[in-house]
Image (cartoon, helix red, strand yellow):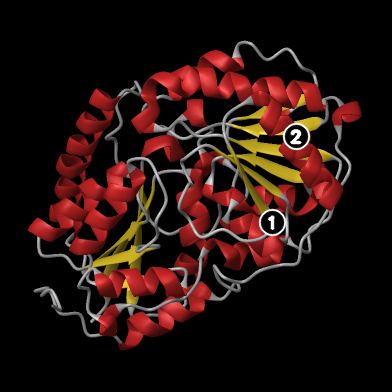
Amino acid sequence: MIKKICIPITSRGNYGKVRSIVDELTKSKNYEIIIMAGGSAILEKYGNIFASDYINNIPRVHNIQFLLDEQTPYSMAQSTGNSIIEFSKFFKKVKPDLVFVIADRFEFLGIAIASTYMNIPIVHLEGGEVTGSIDESIRHAISKLAHIHFPATTESKKRLIKMGENPKFIHNVGSTSFDLLEKCRANKINELHKFQDSIDNSPSMHVESKKYLVVVKHPITTEYDNNYKNTMELLKAINEINMKTFWIMHNMDAGSDGINKVFKNIKNNNIILCKSMPLEIFGTMLNHAACIIGNSSAGIRESSFLGLPSVNIGDRQKSREKLDNVIDIKCDHKKIYSAIKLQLKKKKYKRNFTYGNGSAGKKIASILSKSKIILQKKITY
């Protein structure tokens, strides 16, 4: 009997995390893969990644609208409620046997709640991690609803066991995005130039390997009123550094309106604003960058895998497992400037595989083919 597996893609980051899983599961005749697309992944203002030429061989994409067109704590709560309603409608229609849920996004809490009440087993990626902001609470809440766990680190697996999850269903496979990232390591800088030409037609703006920065700064929901001020501090530091910089648009969390206001103040021709991009391009961009700056998990996970110098700003990734390539800094433009200058001298760090080695997709497909899921969960202590 063929099993229907629903996999959500609601942001560019989700795509990178599930791409190798989709590729591996579609090799089997035992599964029917159903892609649930929504959120920033299908909105033009965030770059609509499904419009990219790189997004190919994706089976059965269904668009599910749940996101309100504003980014406040109130709208996040409403969007979460909408996700419960809209995804439960979809589940009633397609009757999946399994649903994947990724990390700590607010919409995935809605998907997990809908799945739980409809007796659909949940697979959770990247549970057990400690970070900051509201993501911390959402991630652990999802873990308590999930039936099979695929954490990315040894420490994360230990935390899930401490939370009372059954060790039999916890498998440390590493970060799934590394599977695609490993392939990107072979890409030449001209792959990035092609992407540049699609957003800026000036050949003179083409970057050179190791001579540009990457900035990814997301809003912090629990610091809603400070997002504009903190992002302005970052902009001041980037202006002072005066290097070519890819500044990649933030996620759809509450507080992003404050960051959007900062974009209106950007007058530096060295800064290239990017709405979004698939991991195939982002991985190439990171591999040839001199440093990544901001508060994205990419500055912790992907940077360590590539040995890329990283400046982590503020509390969003405060407690996440960090490696030697990361400098933690408060959101002050002078401190940010100094940290970037220090990292530019380092040039390259030794690659670290704490978060995985680039083979997670195959491991997940293999484990799922042998797993017998117990729908009724029971705490282990």
Mark nearer the N terminus (1 vs 2): 1
Identify the residue at horizontal 48%, vertical 47% (top origin): 317
Amino acid on which the number 2 mark rests in the picture: Ser
Q: What residue sits right under mark 2 in the picture? A: 338
Query: Which quadrant of the rendered structure holds the C terminus?
Result: bottom left
CA separation in Å, label 1 and label 2: 15 Å
Identify the residue at horizontal 75%, vertical 54% (top origin): 287
Q: Is residue 94 above or below residue 38?
A: below
Q: Position of residue 193 (x, y in %)?
A: 81, 41
From the viewer's perspective, tell me whether residue 53 is left or right of residue 185: left
Amino acid on which the number 1 mark rests in the picture: Asn
Q: What residue sits right under mark 1 in the picture? A: 325
From the viewer's perspective, tell me whether residue 2 is left or right of residue 226: left
- 111 or 25: nearer the viewer: 111
Query: Which quadrant of the rendered structure holds the N terminus?
Result: bottom left
* Local SS, label 1: loop
